[in-house]
Amino acid sequence: MISIIIPAHNERQNLSQLLPMLNSEASSVVFEVLVMLSCGSTDGSENLEVAPNVKFVKCQGKGRSVQMNTGASMALGNVLVFLHADVRPPVSFLNDIEKTLNEDYEAGFFSYRFDKESFWLDINASFTAKDGIFTGGGDQCLFIKKKTFENLGKFDENQALMEDFEFFKRMKRNKIPYKIINNDLIVSARKYESNSYLRVNLSNFLLVVLFKMGISSETLKSIHNKLLKMPYQQNT
């Protein structure tokens, strides 16, 4: 069984599109969906009409790490999938995950492309099809065996930003076998629409470099908030 965990903060519009898509996939894979709402969510996402396998949970603590860890602790599945609310999966999403884990990988990610036609965004997306400095970011949708996730110590709840990169760092240190599936997710370009392409890329590069240098997550978060205008209210 697969448990899809979606951390969300005032994402009703995106959830209203994503949740029906997940249940429309023609697949024999048994799965559940846990939408982990932040304690500050106020848009009534939990009132959406959904399929019986979808559950909304209001989290008490702050931060995406808390949301995702809480979802993992409640999950009935032996496979965990961490999916952002504004990401749209490919048609064979669940089958791709099942096939990969049956090939003796313990985890994996997906390549992605943006929901906006742009030469420059296409260049960005092309890097997600192979291992590199940006591998492990949340938009790539981490899937992992639950036992492996727990053995690695789950997400660091003290990591205020880039909790996905920090977890991936532990995956590599522990030599967890993983695969990048070249079947594109569709990722929202809303951050690029609120900021220039150059500004987002330079900010992302700076944050990754500073993270790898060991700069604290609180400092990284402060830098991120100063450099970028976010098109949605963040879960802080």
Image (spheres, rainbow, N blue to C red):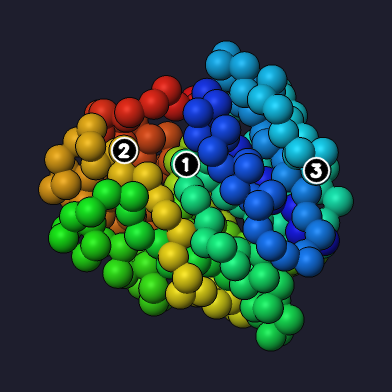
Question: Residue 58 location, x and y as percent?
Answer: 71, 24
Do labels 1 and 3 touch, CB within 8 Å? no
Residue 144 in which image quadrant: bottom right
**Who is closer to the viewer here, 61 or 113?**
113
Name the side, left or right, on which 123 lies relative to 230: left
Q: Determine which residue is flagged by label 1.
A: 86
Q: Determine which residue is flagged by label 3.
A: 53
Do labels 2 and 1 touch, CB within 8 Å? yes
Badge 3 or badge 2: first in the primary sequence: 3
Q: CA distance from mark 3 to mark 2?
A: 29 Å
Question: Residue 40 location, x and y as percent?
Answer: 58, 17
**Who is closer to the viewer here, 105 or 161?**
105
Name the side, left or right, on which 11 lies relative to 58: left
Q: CA distance from mark 2 to mark 1?
A: 9 Å
Name the side, left or right, on which 222 lies relative to 141: left
> Residue at position x 76%, y 59% from top?
2
Q: Determine which residue is flagged by label 2.
A: 190
Give the crowd class for mark 1: few <14, some 14-19, many >=20 residues within 10 Å.
many
Q: Is residue 172 above or below residue 155?
A: below
Give the crowd class for mark 2: few <14, some 14-19, many >=20 residues within 10 Å.
some
> Residue at position x 53%, y 56% from top?
89
The reply to whether residue 50 is in sight is yes
Badge 1 or badge 3: first in the primary sequence: 3
Question: Residue 9 location, x and y as percent?
Answer: 54, 27
| Kind of residue sitting beneath label 2 | Arg
Q: Secondary structure at mark 3?
A: loop
Give the crowd class for mark 3: few <14, some 14-19, many >=20 residues within 10 Å.
few
The residue sitting at the top extreme is 42
Residue 153 in which image quadrant: bottom right
**Who is closer to the viewer here, 135 or 49?**
49
Q: Secondary structure at mark 2?
A: helix
